[in-house]
Image (cartoon, rainbow, N blue to C red):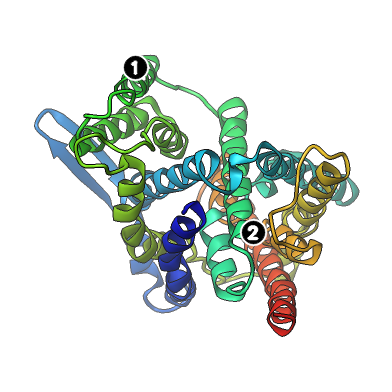
Amino acid sequence: MARKFTLDFLKTEAASGGALGVAALAALIVANSALGPAYFAWLKSEHLLQLGPLMLEMTISEWIKEGLMAVFFLVVGLEIKYEILRGELSDPKKLATPVIAAAGGMIAPALVYLGISGALGGPHQGWPIPLATDIAFALAVFAVVARNLPSSLRVFLLTLAIVDDLGAIALIAVLFSSGVQLMPLLGVAGLLIAGGVAARFRKVPAPFWVLGFAGVWWLTVQAGLSTSLTAVAFAAIVPVNPRKEDGQSPLKEAMHDLHPYVSWLVLPLFAFAKAGVSFAGLSLEQATAPLVIGIALGLFLGKQIGVFGAAWLASALKIGNKPSGSTWLELYGVSLLCGIGFTMSLFIGVLAFPGAIDSPEQVEVKLGVLGGSLLSALAAGAILGVAARRRKNFA
């Protein structure tokens, strides 16, 4: 039953992978056309949300990143919890492997970046940029090229990516946080604790969870924290056991209801908002700057070395198992996918090199992230395509 539920849940994701790619390509085309100025002005335009005395004003870009993407991270958190309690990751050894691989996938890119920046005289403060895997784009590429491969690989990728993202968020909190508001943060903690206590009672109606998540989200924004972290934390308290009155699991119900909106609205809109990079005035010298090379190779080389090497080590030391039914070639292809940085990498780049959106450092960050992510996606597509054809031929 757990395997069937996972497969059913991921059908929409596989179908929407093309839509995500089209949205990203459209953003690049628009950003480099006559519509470019209007596109960037739209992303920077501010809009106010007011509910009685409560007011919140953010740009379109921020509403997408902090608002809509919080729903995405909620769904990801729900999927991880379900797999840990009922599915593929209920085996501690299978859970250990993606967690260890995520750690390797953060250490190796940092070392690669620092090695290149040291050799070429690049800025050292960019080392956290290639550490993160973009869950949305990695899953979209996997959905397109790996349809004949075991679903356990997708669960492995999903788990690794969320651990990776949480690690990146922790780094942001340690390295770049300033001005975090204590009272809203205490409110977030209080709501999460109250929700955890309420989850022990199976008669809690669905609107409770909707209002609870809205409250946690609002206080998270007021505290100045990333909503992705608290969205995953909220998912952890949503009960998986069915309610007594109707036999429905709040967790499975939420996943079923939210997933189509995330796949067909949230992720394509996010891709359209974040993939738009203008190449006007770009020089060869800037395209091959140490910062660009360090980020690109940190993602492309560092990620595959760290993830695959750590997964192999976990298996060799018998402290973890590779995803059930998978081969090492398939796992290597997934390791390459982890080099798709994008979202969190671009976000960390803004923090590491504060300044104007069109500053030389910001342009180089975007070039490095896009270059490393594209190399990783193409290489992963080739490897996973070969692996899928092999499995189909020997089926």
As rendered, which of 346 and 187 lies closer to the eye?
187
Q: Nearer the viewer, residue 318 or 49?
A: 318
Task: State the residue lying farthest toward the right.
Answer: 119
| Disc 2: which residue | 153
Q: Which residue lies at the image location 42% right of the left edge and 70% below the top edge?
A: 16
Which residue does the image show at 55% across and 61% down from the upper left? 139
Q: Position of residue 237 (x, y in %)?
A: 39, 30
| Residue 319: quadrant of the picture | top right
Q: Name the residue: 82% across, 46% down.
A: 315
Q: Amino acid at mark 1?
A: Gly
Q: Residue at point 69% right, 49% down?
A: 130
Badge 2 marks a residue whose secondary structure is helix
Residue 69: x percent and y percent? Answer: 40, 49
The image quarter containing residue 137 is bottom right
* Relative depth, front residue between 357 and 318: 318
Front of the two marks 1 and 2 = 2
Q: Toward which corner of the image does residue 127 lie, by quadrant? A: top right
Q: Which mark is residue 166?
A: none
List the residue tagged with mark 1.
Answer: 190
**Residue 203 appears left or right of 240:** left
Assess disc 1: are there few (<14), some (14-19) or many (≥20) residues with their C-alpha within 10 Å of its C-alpha.
few
| Above or below: residue 117 compared with residue 279 | above
Image coords of residue 374 (percent x, y): 65, 68
Which residue type carries mark 2? Leu
Residue 349, can we see it?
A: no
